Image: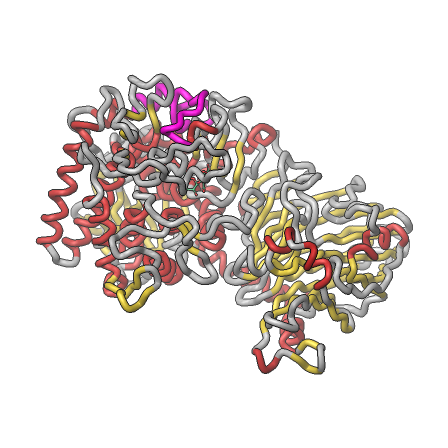
Amino acid sequence: MKFGFFDDANREYVITTPETPFPWINYLGNEDFFSLVSNTAGGYSFYKDAKFRRLTRYRYNNVPMDNGGRYFYINDGGTVWSPGWKPVKTPLDKYECRHGMSYTRITGEKNGLEAETLFFVPLKSWCEVQKVKLTNHTNEKKQFKLFSFMEWCLWNAEDDQNNLQRNLNTGEVEIADSTIYHKTEYKERRNHYAFYHVNAPVQGYDTDRESFVGLYNEFSGPKAVLEGRPTNSHAHGWSPIASHYLEIELAPGESKELVFLLGYIENKEEEKWEAKNIINKKPAKAVIDQFDTPAKVNKAFEELRAYWDDLLGNFVLDSGDEKLDRMVNIWNQYQCMVTFNMSRSASFFEVGIGRGMGFRDSNQDLIGFVHQIPERARERIIDIASTQFQDGGAYHQYQPLTKRGNDAIGGNFNDDPLWLILSTTEYIKETGDFSILDEKVPFDNDMSVAKSHFEHLKLSFYHVVNNLGPHGLPLIGRADWNDCLNLNCFSKDPNESFQTTENKSGGTAESLMIAGLFVVYGREYIKLCRQIGIEKEADEAQKHVDNMVEAIKKHGWDGNWYLRAYDFFGNKVGSNENEEGKIFIESQGWCSMAEVGKEEGMVEKALDSVKERLDCEYGIVLNNPAFTKYVVEYGEISTYPAGYKENAGIFCHNNPWIMIGETSLGRGERALEYYKKICPAYLEDISDLHRTEPYVYAQMIAGKDAFKPGEAKNSWLTGTAAWNYYAITRHILGIQPDYDGLRIDPCIPGEWSGFSVKRKFRGTTFNIKIVNKAAVSKGVKKIVVDGQEIEGNIVKVLDGGDHQVIVEMG
Ligand code: GLC
Ligand code: GLC
């Protein structure tokens, strides 16, 4: 069942009923100021950090689920309704929500009055614009009352919910003309305030929640709205809000536009005040001045559109399959940019006060947006590398505001360092910018011990070499990519964290996932060394990679698939000998991508085992059989109910590893089949089961052992976005940036007759046409660039302009 449709021409998903199977959200903002907005206008805004600068209040896991947001209420002759349906939930005559690229447009109509609100954050601004257009579609004059509403958060989102004994006393506001200023704690240590403005005279306002809502009312029926009159309250402590009250009259057929503006301001210490206890409002007025007419707002909106045209213009696919095109061209790239902005901080599943930036997550996310914003990707790589330790290990997480490693979680996740090689080499291949390797980068943010970025990569490589276990395989540490396979943690205390508890010493648990990862990125490291002419280091590194390949073949093969690990006691994990968890996806993915034992048929066997044991209708599950009992030597993985999360859920992030493995065998048909199973646009028809947004990936879909297979959770902030983008564009469509140019090596279903891609690459636009008359899955017979046949399958970088590339498969 569907709840809307894709409007590809406008790059929008159009939701046609407010009662979606879960709140379907969107993100506004591209740099500093961000908002989450659901299809019924729920959500909140923050400046840079969802924990420390939360501007508006939001209560997670609420009843109903999504309650609280930027709401408008209309009282039209006693009929009270909200244009986004919620919170009032009066049945509307018309409802529509269009989620687009960094904007959302929600329209509601009741009794001939239409209210359309466009929400977006203008580029380079610290504010959210809400342009409200009211239209009278009747033949009579309409007189009605409009109330705006939002609730301020007292800045620190965590403290805001906890420290009530203090917080219920501190709230402060100022009201001047049509602007409500929120200035809690501005007096002492803070130099920032927020404001909510409307570009028209108001006939009243409210700034105290209880006065507006009423102590015994709910958002669905605030007292002031029901009574049709504001109380002009001035908040002192308790819960400050911002609500404007406007009396509006519309002639038959008439429209009026209003611009509401939520802004954030930081003042210089010496410019904090305009009079005693009166905040300096000059900077706020300057922002208001930028967006106080519909014309100015429209111009800012056009700039935002142009920004996205540009970002999405770097890779444009024409495959003949509209679902595939809309994912590759629009939504998957969009989601990758959102993961760049948010990492894992704020979504409807991540509460914005928990995790900082993950070392491994951020490196992997990068492969999804490096072609869109290479300069910012470069900066991100350096930030991440700055949290590395001198032995090549790394903090598992760091905080975006301070950019410092997070002591509470620490390090010892032994896959972490290798992902830095992935992000850096992908960055160089995209841009040709080798200078990043010479950049001086600190360790643990200490500049006095800084070394070149290349040295950081070298240390990452040797961190594995220096931490091998008894089988010559990498020690796992606290966990590898799978945070829940905690082989050095033996926990019987429910108050302990699985991921930071290492309570048995001398652990020698080894990971086949890291082993495969090491072979893949070890080879990338070697290739990079050869590019920059350090052959000796390349030869040296090659020996370590060769040793690892041998160790995997010798100790990592279970007969029909790759083992997953050796546990603390040296017992096999992910073996046919095990009762549960006989086979795991991660090592099949990485050892296949590394092509370990390909000639001997190991890759083919492993991937066939994946098909047989892990694949199901909705995607590939993580392990099988699922764990049904707690295994103390495995940790968190065995705590999840069967079929969910890391215990045999379809953890979408790792499905593309199998797709890429399949392409190395040339099985394009199967690779694409896996792609479609988890790709949201193909799941639109089963939205009632899938539940999360049909335009973005979710981290997890319940697996075949779950109570409800096919039901997704945790949409938006997941490495799934980057990896699926990578799998489809680099390995299935086969357009791969490389040091010397664009390598073209598609792996597609044999029945595809071809496709076209427009790819902007280092300043040149390549119009690539792939022709598959031979009906093969893989193999490039001939490439012609601007009428000239070239040798091999790498199209060299040309200096600018548009170029035609015809690729004949065969
Ligand atoms: C979460 C984490 C990621 C981890 C994955 C598997 O997505 O953010 O770092 O690799 O779970 O456990
Ligand atoms: C839990 C989740 C895992 C996530 C981790 C982050 O273990 O299952 O997916 O990566 O928390 O700390």
The number of discs equals 0
Looking at the image, in which quadrant does ligand 2 appear?
A: top left
Direction from residue 167 to residue 253 in the image, left or right:
right
Queried whether the magenta region covers residue 609, the answer comes back as: yes
Q: Is residue 785 left or right of residue 28?
A: left
The residue under the point 25% across, 33% down is 591
Q: Position of residue 419 (x, y in %)?
A: 31, 47
Q: Relative to 575, is 386 above or below?
A: below
Q: Is residue 214 above or below residue 446?
A: above
On the question of residue 345 being in view, the answer is yes
Give the residue displayed 66% in from the left and 80% down from the top: 273
| Position in image of residue 503 (x %, y %) | 36, 37
Quadrant of residue 664 within the rendered picture: top left
State whether residue 10 appears in this view.
no
- Residues drawn in magenta: 607-635
Q: Residue at x 24, y 37 (%)?
A: 515
Question: Is residue 449 shown above or below 212?
Answer: below
Residue at image point 90% right, 49% down: 78
